[in-house]
Image: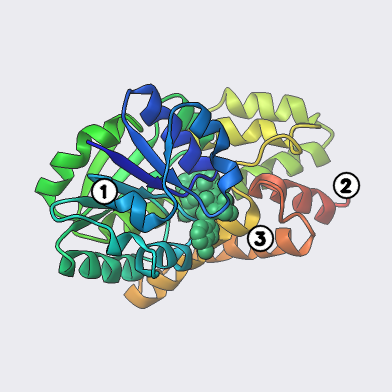
Amino acid sequence: MNIGFVGLGAMGAGIVRRLLAAGRPVTGWNRTKAKAEPLLAAGMEWADSPRELASVSDVVCTMLTDAAAVEAVVLGDEGILSGLGPGSFYVDMSTISPERSRALAEAVSAAGSTMLDAPVSGSMATLERGELSIMVGGDGSSFEKVRPVLLDMGSKITHVGENGQALVLKLAINLSLVVQIISFCESIAFAEKSGIARETAVDAVLKSVIASPVVAYRAPLILEGNMDEAVFADVELQQKDQLLGLALARELESPMPLAALANEWLTATRAAGLNDRDFVAVHQVFRALGGMK
Ligand SMILES: NC(=O)c1ccc[n+]([C@@H]2O[C@H](COP(=O)([O-])OP(=O)(O)OC[C@H]3O[C@@H](n4cnc5c(N)ncnc54)[C@H](OP(=O)(O)O)[C@@H]3O)[C@@H](O)[C@H]2O)c1
């Protein structure tokens, strides 16, 4: 299978590296071509437009910031939809609104191809270890055909249900993830306020029952000097998912009081000028509120 990959940002580039390492032929396109250079050096082919990429691919994947970006590269004049061949598959791995994803799936289906939504849970670190979790929504037999390609990206694959349902589950996971991390930050600031060194508190948490995988990879970021080096998801990117989840919850009349409260902390973290940091920077907001520098 020839793979086409659109969106060579942090996650997209990491996935393409895994596909190339597995021996898959990959053609790529990114709005900013410079980001593709290391992948071109590693054997990826370049297409001059999403349309050209789709015309030479059996499976086209996108990994883009938001729904507006996905709609632009799929439905635009030189977009994926205008290049997809009959019987090909389009797999969107971005985290976007399930409703807008379903509308795209209908447009792709009307053009004679099949779309799957395949959002991912994990970080760059999870991806590099081959442990990315990929949830898939859409037709079951199409999922089976694309599954071997997904397995080259990450080892944990779940077919959730119809189009859009994988995105719903991804949002559910992220709503919980943000609550967990904010609660962790609140507890560490509390421990520090009582005089416990941050390193000691983090070390003890990582040895405790609350050391979930996400706490394990994010906790070290709050240690002195680490915050500048790693950003798994900046505050705005993380809040995009929080807002999508809360909007859907309101529509479904499914109360999410903890996720709503956590969202206010993300707003406070942006307001504190920490938007370019990983959202675990909320720890600094708790410290400031507690009168610590
Ligand atoms: N980072 C994580 O740990 C993580 C984990 C799970 C899921 N996700 C999800 O994965 C997706 C990508 O995240 P990321 O971390 O890879 O973000 P990123 O590094 O910021 O990459 C974003 C990509 O989207 C492209 N893009 C944005 N707007 C565009 C537009 N209007 N037209 C064409 N291309 C556009 C960017 O192109 P340029 O290079 O030209 O800017 C870039 O390739 C998001 O939906 C995110 O929620 C991320």
Farthest left residue in view? 141
Q: Label 1 belongs to which residue?
A: 136
State how many labels appear: 3
Q: Amino acid at mark 1?
A: Val
Q: Nearer the viewer, mark 1 or mark 2?
A: 1
Q: Nearer the viewer, residue 61 or 246?
A: 61
User: What's the residue at 48%, 62% (across, down)?
Assistant: 66
Q: Label 2 belongs to which residue?
A: 292
Horizontal relation, residue 288 to residue 245: left or right: right
Q: Nearer the viewer, residue 283 or 113?
A: 113
Label 2, residues with CA under 10 Å away: few <14, some 14-19, many ≥20? few
User: What's the residue at 51%, 67% (across, down)?
Assistant: 243
Q: Nearer the viewer, residue 231 or 211?
A: 231
Classify residue 98 by image quadrant: bottom left
Say whether disc 3 or disc 2 marks the residue closer to the N-terminus: 3
Q: Are marks 3 and 2 in contact (CB under 8 Å)?
A: no
In the rendered view, would you say 256 is above or below 287? below
Q: What separation in Å lies between label 1 and label 2 (alpha carbons)?
A: 44 Å
Horizontal relation, residue 158 to residue 144: left or right: right
In the rendered view, would you say 106 is above or below 224? below
Q: Amino acid at mark 2?
A: Met
Q: Nearer the viewer, residue 255 or 217?
A: 217
Residue 212 visible in image:
no
Classify residue 51 by image quadrant: bottom left
User: What's the residue at 41%, 28% (across, down)?
Assistant: 18
Label for residue 265? 3
Q: Secondary structure at mark 2?
A: loop
